Every structure is written in C-alpha cells, then in structure tokens.
Amino acid sequence: MADRDWKVLHLDERLIVLDKPSGMLSVPGRGDDKYDSLAVQVAADFPGARNVHRLDRDTSGVIVMARDVDAHRELSRQFEQRETDKRYVAVVAGILAGESGRIELPLRKDFDRPPRHMVDPQQGKPAVTDWQVEARCADSTRLALIPQTGRSHQLRVHLQAIGHPILGDPLYAPESLQAAAPRLMLHALELEITDPSSGERIRFVAQTPF
C-alpha cells in the first residue's frame, strides 16, 4: 500500500473527516494496481467506514466518510440534494478580469477521450461554478471556487473552458502549464454538512498545502 499520509480532521461514532493528499484515489479504481485508495486504507483502520463522495485523485482536501449505514444514507442524500456547501482553492493560468463571476456550462463525459469530461450545450448536464479572486501573480490567479453542482471534473473543465486551466492539471492543461506546478493546484478547503446525529450544521477545514 501507499504511504498513509492522510490526516484525520474529525472523528466520532458516525463520521470520519479526512484531509486527502494529492495523488491518492478516493476509492478503488479498475485493476489491481488501482485498488489502494483512501477508502481501503481508512476502512482498514476504521472498519465499516465507507465513502459518501469523492475527490479526484490529484485533488487534495476535505472528504467525509460515514461509519454506519444510516449515516451513509443521510450524508449521501445531502450530497445528492445539494445540501452541502463546498469551497475549493485553485491556482489557474492567466489573469482573470473582474473579482468574481459564475461559470454555467453543461458537462458530459468525453467518450472519445476517457477519463476526460467536456462542455456540451446540447447533451451535457447543468453545471455551475462560482469563483472569487483571492490573489493575482504575474501570470496566474489564485481563486476561491464554490461549486453549485457536483459534476465529475467540473472545476477543472469549467476553468479550462474559459481559458484559465488549473496549473499542473494532467488532463486539461497544455504541457507547458502541466509543468508549471508540482501537482494539480486544486484543493478542497472547506466542507459544511448537517450532522446526521444532532441535525446541526458542521464545517470542516483542511489547510491549503500550496
């Protein structure tokens, strides 16, 4: 197995909240070489823990797992019904005009180039991303991203589609921008959910590693 460099941010009888490192699968993929994952490693230490949602392999940050069947059902419902609040940090190529904005571009799988996804105004599913500028450098911009939907690769495809791919993105950035960072510069900073036990809103933060 790979090194266990994930961190536990919160642990109780029903939840475990983790800080996933970049480069680790959230759940097992196809093939023996893709079996090792956060889900497998956490379940080895906390039997019964199961994934509620996923982060891309190269995205780091907050991810929650349920420790019993009822908690899994309730948290899954919250994600499906978009009752969770998520906030990401990204460093993208170029300088965005304005201080904030919204990207509304429907997405679907790119069947000719898996595992990529793509913008498709006719057959894509609705996808919405809000962004805010946090800082500008000479040739890049640091953004806060607030996804309003949860499509696969949504943030990565949306930013590439408006001409500002995320630095270090091996799927959607040109080679020069892939080499401009040591990793995908995308991090799940905050996650807010409703506690399945108390019914209260709870928020978790994983500090940005870049």
Image (cartoon, rainbow, N blue to C red):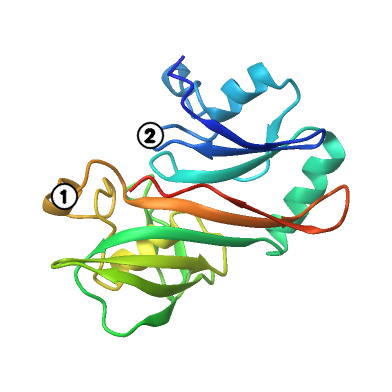
Q: Nearer the viewer, residue 4 or 55?
A: 4
Residue beneath the point at 44% across and 36% down? 21
Q: Please give left or right for residue 7 compared with residue 197 in the image.
A: left
Q: Position of residue 207 (x, y in %)?
A: 47, 48
Classify 10 Å Cα crowding around label 1: few (below 14), some (14-19), many (20 and above): some
- Seen as rendered, the residue at the extreme bottom is 98
Q: Amino acid at mark 1?
A: Ala
Q: Position of residue 83 (x, y in %)?
A: 71, 64
Q: Count how many numbered circles sit on residues in the image.
A: 2
Q: Position of residue 59 (x, y in %)?
A: 42, 45
Q: Tags 1 and 2 in contact by the CB under 8 Å rule?
A: no
Residue beneath the point at 11% across and 52% down? 176
Q: Which residue is mark 2?
A: 23
Q: Callout 1: helix, strand or loop?
A: loop
Q: In this picture, is 49 found above or below 90?
A: above
The answer to whether residue 54 is visible is: no
Quarter occupied by residue 44: top right
Distance CA(mark 1)–CA(mark 2): 17 Å
The answer to whether residue 181 is visible is: yes
Q: Please give left or right for residue 205 compared with residue 77 in the image.
A: left
Q: In this picture, is 204 found above or below 121?
A: above
Counting residues from the start of the chain, the first of labels 1 and 2 encountered is: 2
Classify 10 Å Cα crowding around label 2: few (below 14), some (14-19), many (20 and above): some
Q: Position of residue 117 (x, y in %)?
A: 39, 56
Q: Please give left or right for residue 26 compared with residue 72 in the image.
A: left
Q: Which residue is mark 1?
A: 180
